[in-house]
Image (cartoon, helix red, strand yellow):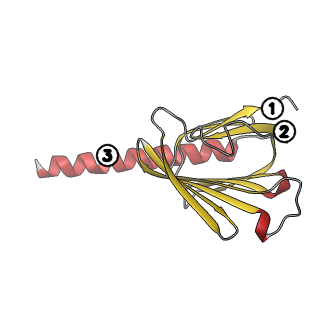
Amino acid sequence: MFKCLINKIKEKKRRKEEEERQVAERIKNARMTATSMGISIWNAGPGKSYDGTYKFLRKEIDTGNNIITIYFAENEKLTIVNPLGVLWEGVLITVDDADKVIWEQYDYDKPQSEETFNRTEFVKIDRNHVKIIFTRYNNKKEEIINISNKRAVETLQSPL
């Protein structure tokens, strides 16, 4: 019985590692073109879901740490830590779940500086809750939201 339990644990670990490898491979091979998109992070950000238009520049994949980083114009950056259920079609991205999502941007129409830099971290607490940590210069605000039946990251093609 003990041996059976160990084998089940090993199989579960092997399946998870294989899924992570497949996700990393799909992302690595995805072709993206410079285009504009709206972004939704657990239906809570950046700003309101899909409220802005972000011009894609490039992506980086750190397969060793299982991190996707996407860079946009205006020094905006989206980092997804331990993404699961990633679907990458052209420029459109869907991430069903992740341990953490970080959005970094500067205030619009102002010079980029330490005072105009904003960082929002979405840290998964459990399958139904995410802690949002919003940091701007010397100010920090935290809240917990319900994420039931919401995807970690979704993008929407902008008509621009």
Q: Say which amino acid is labelled 2.
A: Thr
Residue that appears at 18% across and 48% down: 5
Residue position for label 1: 158
Number of other residues with Cα within 10 Å of mark 1, as a class: few under 14, some 14 to 19, many 20 or more: some
| Rendered image quadrant of residue 43 | top right
The image shows residue 149 at horizontal and vertical percentages of 47, 32
Numbered badge on residue 11: 3
Note whether residue 81 is visible: no
- In the picture, measured across the screen, residue 6 lies left or right of residue 23, that is left
Disc number lying in front (2 or 3): 2
**Local secondary structure at mark 3:** helix
The image shows residue 94 at horizontal and vertical percentages of 61, 36
Numbered badge on residue 35: 2
Number of other residues with Cα within 10 Å of mark 3, as a class: few under 14, some 14 to 19, many 20 or more: few
Looking at the rendering, in which quadrant would you find the C terminus?
top right
- In the picture, measured across the screen, residue 55 lies left or right of residue 46, that is right
Q: Earlier in the sequence, mark 2 or mark 1?
A: 2
Disc number lying in front (1 or 3): 1
Q: Earlier in the sequence, mark 2 or mark 3?
A: 3
Q: Say which amino acid is labelled 1.
A: Ser
